[in-house]
Image: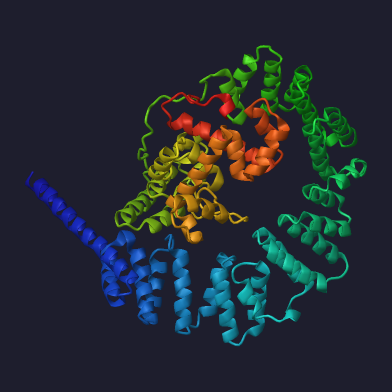
Amino acid sequence: MKRLIIFFVFILIFSQITYAYESSGKEYLKKGRNFLEQKKYSEAIEFLTKAANEFTLLEDYALLWLSDALHESGEHEKSLATIRLLLKKYPDSSLGKKARIREIKEAEEISDNDVQKLFESYLKDYQNDSDIKYLYARWLKKNDNPGSAKKIFKDLYISGNSYSDIAFSELQPCDLTSEDLFKRSRNLMNNYDYKSAERTLRMALAKSEGILRRQILTELGHSLFKQKRYSEAAEIYNQTQDKYWELRSRYRAREKETVLSSVDEMLNAGDRRIVSVLVAVASDKRREGDFAGAIELFRKIIDKYPSEREEAIWGIGWTYFLSGEYKKSSEIFKELFDKYNDSKYLYWYARSIDMSGENASDKYKRLVENKKDFYSLIAGRRMNSSINLIKSSETIKIKKPVISSKDYLSKKLDRIECLLELGFQKEAASEMLYISRKTNSTDDIYYICTKLNEIGYYNHSVRLASKMPEIQKMMEFLYPLAHWEIVERFSDKYNLDPLLILAVVREESRFDSDARSPAGALGLMQLMPSTAFRFDKKLKIGIRNSHDILNVRNNLNIGIYYLSNLIKDFDSFAPAIASYNAGEDIVRKWLKEGRYKSADEFIEDIPYQETRNYVKKVLSSYFEYKRIFSSDDLMSGIPIEKL
């Protein structure tokens, strides 16, 4: 008994010593990092050395930051030795990539014999790291290997990334062939840099001959099309004799007479791609009230392009519906649903029956019960039903999941908790994303998503949750209450449902506060700078540059104010949401020409596919937010015509 008591006393004392040891190690790490950021390198070296010796849980962080401090102090040999200790002791550390970069730079500083080997080994594992590629090219040039250096500079230029301009300064015009320039243009197009792609393609044209010239012209047409310079694009496509792209461009340029005069040519072209232009022409006829002409053209499409029959038959059914011939439209939508089992067809089959004055409740019920998508949600509204849509007023509670019992994972999760406790949120987020790539456990991902949300990294938690098989368990991460205090404050100020705002943010940026679109839209609500500056005159926030627009509070303030104005102007969600995406003037034009009887008709007939899908996605996300978080009836205060 006495021995047992002594044993427990020993354990108690040992655990207290260990706790004190770890606590001091944590404090050393925090102080060392703070001194490093303050550029007090001697103090940083002192405290980070102690942290590395006393705090094994985060020793790799201590060693990395110690290496940084030694580097800044000019002690490159010690810095290199420190980073190599990290790589040796912690080969699976999340800091491995950063450590290898530091190793390369320190080895270069002291002219270590292994520099080239380190560069090549790193680039074998991280082939797309342009920073290190550029450093390697410079090192090769400096060390009398200009041929190999030039090859890398050329690759960097062709890649079209941030180093391409500086890499170009290392090259001569004769170093680049028309094929090189063509490859560069393709990369620039993939990076949404259409103007630079155009310039590069014109350079390539000056050098090219034969088969490649046609490819260059086609790509030049694409670069002009993406810049919305449709008439210029059409002339380029005319040179390549690509009728699909030429007529698609002329349609976008509103060269109506040219397109209409080419209908027979398109019908006989035998190019399935051109059907999209023919469908657009037929849809325009319908919008202009020429229902017979629209149906005639749709029937010709079926005759000439039987493989595209589904889209053309839908066009006929939709024309019948909008012209009020509901019996005919119901027959066509039933035929389409029976063959393709698409909820879109079932919904409009039900609507046709409904508009005929008959009871379609069984069709709506089937939609609501069988599939959860945009059509099932608005079908539920048509029924005034709560099936699969209404959730009780239970508050969503974030709970810590049962963590895997594996020692490896438990230690990794302890590291996350410790980093968060120390206030190192960026490092904690990186650690979590690193772990997420190495685990298949739903519980681990649930835990990671919970922690990411707690520190405001919503875009990462949405992405992780969307990849998990147990979607229902991850719903609060797929639809997070992101930046809730700010959203709620401005939504209340401008009299909007905050859940609608979150739905818009979800579809605009997936909660990435640094999101930038190819068109130049910025932040959570993807504000164009011109829009931000326009509304800032009213709100007086003090917007001066893109950094101010990206600020979460500023972005939400302006975006919510803008959307509230649109909803007031249109007195309906769908056209307001469409205007947020496509612009107010064009939406007013659609409404005026369409003379729609209901909101769902307007949504289905939006001419821009991107805007049509956007409105459906926003409303679907809004319904899902209401289902998860609202204690009210999902549709309370939202009559169908307000959608």
The residue furthest front is 538
Q: Position of residue 137 (x, y in %)?
A: 59, 78
Query: What is the number of callouts on the image?
Result: 0
Q: Position of residue 540 (x, y in %)?
A: 44, 53
As drawn, is 168 to the left or to the right of 90?
Answer: right
As drawn, is 473 to the left or to the right of 596?
Answer: left
Q: In this orientation, which residue lies closer to the viewer: 106 or 578? A: 578
- Rendered-image quadrant of the N terminus: top left
Q: Is residue 612 visible?
A: yes
The residue furthest bottom is 144
As drawn, is 33 to the left or to the right of 322?
Answer: left
Q: Is residue 226 above or below residue 640?
A: below
The residue furthest top is 358
Residue 598 sits in quarter: top right
Q: Is residue 318 above or below residue 364?
A: below
Q: Is residue 369 visible?
A: no
Q: In this orientation, which residue lies closer to the viewer: 575 or 387? A: 575
Residue positioned 63% across, 29% down in the render: 599
Q: In this orientation, which residue lies closer to the viewer: 122 or 632? A: 632
Q: Position of residue 301 (x, y in %)?
A: 86, 35
Residue positioned 60% across, 88% down in the render: 144
Residue 520 sits in quarter: bottom right
Q: Which color scheme does this rendered protein use?
A: rainbow
Residue positioned 39% across, 81% down in the render: 77
Q: Is residue 433 above or below residue 629?
A: below
- Rendered-image quadrant of the C terminus: top right
